Amino acid sequence: MTPTLSGRIQTRLALTLTVGVVVTLMVTPFLPYNTYFSRTRHQALPGAYLITFASLGLVAAVGVVWELIYHGLQQLRWDKDWPSPLGILTGLNESIVVYVMIRWFGPRPHWTGMPPSAFLLHFYAVWLAVFFTANGPMRVLLIRWRYRGGRIV
């Protein structure tokens, strides 16, 4: 069954809050940092966690808006769903929007310590982990999830 709009939103938020948090906790210490922010990696780590969790929150919030846009576009397709390769490419749209938002509205003193490459590494690590979890283990382990249109609640 094709996931419904509410099912896609619920799945996106649930996976971002579980898989996304775990990936963020694991990836953040290994991201590149700027020595302008601090002299050692140990001093830069709290700022790095602040910016990665801020971007993770934006990914969740912006993702809900994107789901509404994707839903409208899907109504133009005969099968009302995206092929999986196109689903991976939607991460490109979201990364651009989240990057622009974090640059404009993100925590100012901390952003100078996190180069764009670090943002992109973090974003795509989370994006791919969430995408492959939704299209792999969730379909196998949670069979009823798929038959309920992707709804969790």
Image: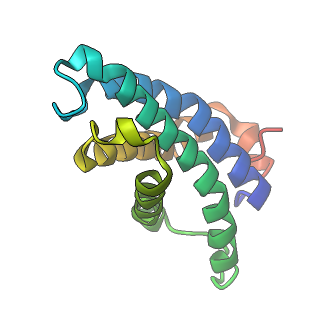
Q: State the scheme by which the image is colored.
A: rainbow
Along the line of sight, the residue nearer the viewer: 7 or 30: 30
Quadrant the N terminus occupies: bottom right
Residue at (62, 70) in percent of width and height: 70
Q: Residue furthest top?
A: 42
Say whether residue 47 is left or right of residue 53.
Answer: left
Residue at (40, 63) in percent of width and height: 96
* 134 up-or-down from 65: above or below: above
Q: Measured from the top left, where is residue 63 in percent x and y?
A: 60, 55
Q: Measured from the top left, where is residue 143 in percent x and y?
A: 70, 38
Q: Measured from the top left, where is residue 79 in percent x and y?
A: 65, 76
* 45 up-or-down from 99: above or below: above
Q: How many labels does the image show?
A: 0
Along the line of sight, the residue nearer the viewer: 14 or 30: 30
Say whether residue 19 is left or right of residue 6.
Answer: left
Q: Residue furthest right?
A: 153
Q: Quadrant of residue 74?
A: bottom right
* 78 up-or-down from 129: above or below: below
Say whether residue 117 is left or right of residue 125.
Answer: left
* 46 up-or-down from 143: above or below: above
Q: Is residue 133 visible?
A: no
Q: Measured from the top left, where is residue 49 in percent x and y?
A: 41, 27
Residue at (16, 31) in percent of width and height: 35
Along the line of sight, the residue nearer the viewer: 48 or 14: 48
Q: Can residue 89 be seen in this view?
A: yes
Residue at (43, 40) in percent of width and height: 126
Quadrant the C terminus occupies: top right
